[in-house]
């Protein structure tokens, strides 16, 4: 049985013999998604929802990195959601991982207060008032065309049980906006980690764990250094990637 369509390829995820279907014409996953999958904590009886799931990279990796009972990915682009579904089927994960096609703002991922863990890799680039962008698959993944940061955070909070955990990966220069959106939605930041491309470079990603209705206490963990030298991953990244 073939799972590929024209223009697609299968990439090895270097973890539990998992593969993922990707198409270079669309937005392929990056380091941010892999780092987020290594930051998420989910137990064996917990339900996980991944918003803005794209080609399903985070649900696939979470199936190997956590003992989560059920993992659901939500993707607004039909073609990309179909690609993710085929990756799930190719890996034989249909009983544990499902992909939903639809708009997260319509509450398709579940009832309010029904989920233990929500992960989200939202679009990083804000659209300013009066600005227009061509709605290509890459633009939708990068820019707030179909979903704003606030909408993603609000849906995260709606889905979570009281005491449930939210996990985000975002850009440091918009960290104040992420904090503001979380606080407005009653998601209390509890754990944060910055990622730097090299030890001497400034951070270009931030990972944040927030708890719905949690008390005020934030722990900033040691940073992640992605590369030891050009093209050579650090030991921590090798562990996260599974190399």
Image (cartoon, grey):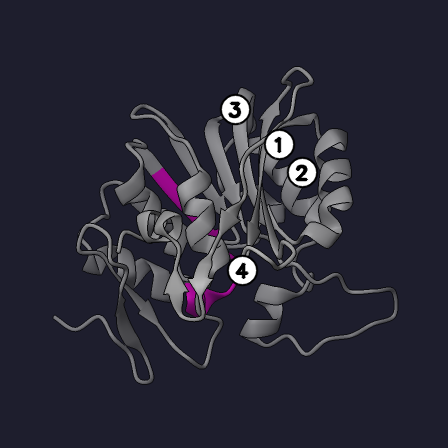
Residue count near mark 1 (Cα–Cα under 10 Å), binned few <14, some 14–19, many ≥20: many
As measured in the structure, the alpha-carbon distance from the residue carrying label 2 to the one carrying label 1 is: 5 Å
Which disc is residue 154 wearing? Answer: 2
How far is mark 3 from mark 2, CA to CA?
14 Å
Please name which of the two marks, 3 or 2, marks the residue nearer to the observer: 3
- Residue 32, how many percent across, how many down? 50, 56
Between circles 3 and 4, the one closer to the viewer is: 4
| Residue at the extreme top of the image, as rendered | 215
**Numbered disc in front, either 1 or 4:** 4
Residue at image mark 1: 157
Q: Quadrant of the C terminus?
A: bottom left
Report if residue 7 is visible in the image.
Answer: yes
Mark 4 sits on what residue? 197
| Furthest residue toward bottom | 6
Q: Which region is colored magenta?
A: 71-80
Is residue 75 magenta-colored?
yes
């Amino acid at each position: 049985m073939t799972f590929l369509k024209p223009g697609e390829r299968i990439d090895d995820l270097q973890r539990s013999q998992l593969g993922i279907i990707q198409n270079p014409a669309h937005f392929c996953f990056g380091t941010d998604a892999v780092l987020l999958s290594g930051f998420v904590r989910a137990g064996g009886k917990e339900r996980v929802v991944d918003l803005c799931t794209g080609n399903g990279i985070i649900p696939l990796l979470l199936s190997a990195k956590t003992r989560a009972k059920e993992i659901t990915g939500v993707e607004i682009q039909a073609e990309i959601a179909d690609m993710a579904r085929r990756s799930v089927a190719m890996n034989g994960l249909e009983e544990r991982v499902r992909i939903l096609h639809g708009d997260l703002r319509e509450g398709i991922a579940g009832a309010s207060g029904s989920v233990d863990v929500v992960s989200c890799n939202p679009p990083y680039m804000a659209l300013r008032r009066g600005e227009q962008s061509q709605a290509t698959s890459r633009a939708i993944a990068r820019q707030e065309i179909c979903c704003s940061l606030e909408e993603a955070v609000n849906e995260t909070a709606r889905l979570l049980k009281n005491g449930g955990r939210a996990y985000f990966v975002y850009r440091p220069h918009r960290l104040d906006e992420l904090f503001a959106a979380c606080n407005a939605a009653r998601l209390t930041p509890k754990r944060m980690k910055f990622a730097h491309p090299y030890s001497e470079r400034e951070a270009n990603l931030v990972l944040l764990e927030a708890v719905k209705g949690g008390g005020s206490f934030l722990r900033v963990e040691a940073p992640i250094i992605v590369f030891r030298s050009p093209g050579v991953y650090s030991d921590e990244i090798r562990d996260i990637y599974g190399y």
